[in-house]
Amino acid sequence: MLVAGIALTMGFSMQSAASSPETNALLDAIQKQYESMQTFRAHFSQVLINSASREAERRTGRVSMKKPGLIRWETLEPEKELLVAAKDVVWDYFEAEKTAYKYKASEILDSKTMLHFLAGTTRLDKDFEVVNAGREDSLTRLDLTPREPEPGLVQASIWADPATGLIQRISMIDFYGNENVVAFTDMSLNPPLDEGLFTFTPPAGVEVFDNTVDAQ
């Protein structure tokens, strides 16, 4: 927990950094890139760090996105998991467990999740206080503090290519201090993507937990 003096210093730094020409130019480049992008495909590597134990769970897979709001997030290692976000529903399927969970899209996608960064529906300059943390290798790191924090996101960082405006890595920290870090590789902009990628029908024998039905 920060003392008041440190918090005030951070607040001043955020406002100063966000107004710098370099930071504003990068924010504009990111916004334009993701607003103009209609489809997106990439491989990802993900690290989930537990705040209490500091244990790290590593995952790899691939992701596809198509506007408006269609996302396929497919974990391949160490275990297969498929998240499909369609217009009204989100499916989360665990192949080995033969279980699938169905949610209302509004319940999953209304918060500032990783998917919002990917889909370009989060406006960095309006939704966050921004600190330019400088260059790391060829990327610029921006530290983001939500103007309206929520349990799933209290702090984030992105690493973006200043030449293209593409976000190549994202770190998100929740209320409990757990960290979710995702890095993208083999990124493809505006590839042709079949609509079938963003539909899901539970295979035979899969147990479905339907969370879209209101309890009576």
Image (tube, helix red, strand yellow):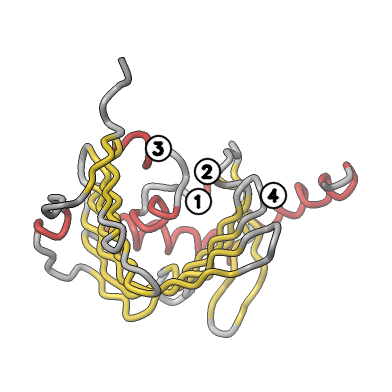
Picture disc at residue 127: 2
> Disc 4 marks which residue?
15
> Disc 1 marks which residue?
124
Residue 200 visible somewhere in the drawing: no
User: Where, quadrant-wise, is the C terminus in this rendering?
Assistant: top left
Amino acid type, callout 3: Asp
In this picture, residue 211 sits left or right of residue 196? right
SS type, badge 3 = loop
Dot 3 or dot 4, earlier in sequence: 4
Dot 3 or dot 2, earlier in sequence: 3
Distance of mark 3 from mark 2, alpha carbons? 13 Å
The residue lying at 67 percent from left, 67 percent from top is 133
* Above or below for 209 versus 74: above
Contact (Cβ within 8 Å) of mark 3 with mark 2: no
Amino acid type, callout 2: Asp
In this picture, residue 172 sits left or right of residue 204? right
Which numbered disc, 1 or 4, marks the residue closer to the eye? 1
The residue lying at 36 percent from left, 69 percent from top is 79
SS type, badge 1 = helix
Between residues 1 and 11, which one lies in front from this camera angle? 1
Contact (Cβ within 8 Å) of mark 1 with mark 2: yes
Distance of mark 3 from mark 4, alpha carbons? 26 Å
Amino acid type, callout 4: Gln
Residue at the far top in the pictured view: 216
> Disc 3 marks which residue?
110
